[in-house]
Image (cartoon, rainbow, N blue to C red):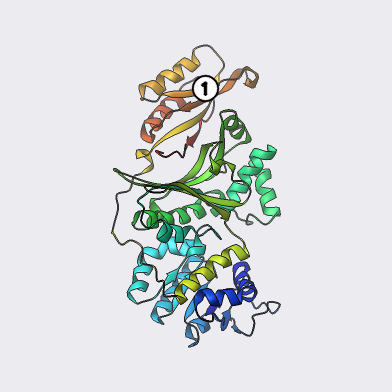
Amino acid sequence: MGLCGLGTVGQGVVELLRRNQASIDVQAGRPIELVRVASRTPKPMVDLGGAAFSTDLADVINDPQVDVVLELIGGEADARQLLLQAIEARKHFVTANKAMIAAHGDELLPNAYEAGISVGFEAAVGGGIPIIKTLREGLAANSINWVAGIINGTSNFILSAMAGKGASFDDALSEAQALGYAEADPTFDIEGVDAAHKLAIMAALAFDCPIAFPAVYTEGISTLTAEDIEYAQALGYRIKHLGIARRSARGIETRVHPALVPEQRLLAKVDGVMNAVVINSDAVGSSLYYGPGAGALPTASSVLADVIDIACNRAARPLSINGEADRLNMAEVDTAYYLRIPAVDQPGVLAQLAQILSQNAISIEAVIQREQAIRVTGSTSWVPVIILTHRVQEQAMNQALETIQALPEVVGQITRIRVEPLDEHA
């Protein structure tokens, strides 16, 4: 096999192969040999075990000894080009590149399958968690109802720090960057793009539908406050950044956003940089898959698992075998809500809010209005009114919030966070 990219994960592959060579060969039923490595930046300190090295990625594709190409370079366009070249050269392909699979998988994976080329991408979702194999194989006899997960370690670390230490978002992000859990430009992580790539792939596998990354509703965590996390805890919830894919009679919904999760759910207890995915299916019910979502050796473990599958001729079928699927937009989704409404501290305001919600067929589950939370802006005394609602279609909530936001008694921007019970009938 040939390796393109010698960054963190690429070096992890080299180390894991050296460490577990004998057992990997046994699992594969044949020797797995790294014969060529290409990286734009030479890394002479890395022991390649005799593999030839070059700075030209094309050398891996063109090497006649290479029958499996490992793409660990990152970058959507370059990775796509490398996969096209691998298909042309009739070489199997393994990647950890979720952005490339999410953006181009519908186009390229069927082409690879028709050419007799296997494309493995276990490492693209969940790092070391075998979630792709679980959806493709372990639960193959099930009808999947929904998938929900914490699938970005950076966001989970930040929210865990905010909940555990009372840190602000900015302070928690700075800590994540200092520890190497967040990039200098963390946009893809904190705004949900990375999680949306992964969710699009999981939904395609769960529901036999196109990947359709543009259809994923995406919302990040940068506007969350320690105050909202505190109120959520008072109500018995933890705030987590979730990717959710659900199939109903009306269609498939795919969405990434912060959500209140009941504190007794296992997913609510997943902290730090760890990932976890819950899959709900008709035969098994709910099952949880937990582990490191990134890192050199966990991701390398998934990469080499794909190599072993290819060596054993366990070729995966392509995605999108059933054509297009009906997609729900966010306004059509049913969920419950947490609302924080900055309202003037005077009699009758809460009743007014409740009336508007009722007029939009939204029922209230819980309310918090603490006297000690009164604040003063200029000459106006106001208080955050916290409302937890029952499930309702989002378009009804949008209409209600538009009316409430326009009230003169509402003195600031309303905060809205969705609530996900993650029960059997969620």
Looking at the picture, how far across and down is residue 376, in whole percent? 64, 21
* Residue at 38% across, 54% down: 206
Residue lying farthest to the top in this orientation: 347
From the viewer's perspective, tell me whether residue 178 is left or right of residue 260: right
Residue at (57, 43) in percent of width and height: 222
- Please, is residue 404 above or below residue 207 in the view? above
Q: Is residue 132 left or right of residue 106?
A: right
Q: Is residue 263 above or below residue 176?
A: above
Please rate how many residues cluster around mark 1, counting C-alpha atoms within 10 Å: few if below 14, some from 14 to 19, many from 20. Answer: some
Give the residue type at disc 1.
Answer: Val
In this view, the residue farthest toward the bottom is 64
Percent of width and height locating residue 142: 36, 53
- On the rendered image, what quadrant is the C terminus found in? top left
Q: Is residue 256 visible?
A: yes
Query: Who's the residue at 40% across and 64% down the image?
Result: 104
Please give the count of numbered marks on the rendered protein: 1
Residue carrying label 1: 367
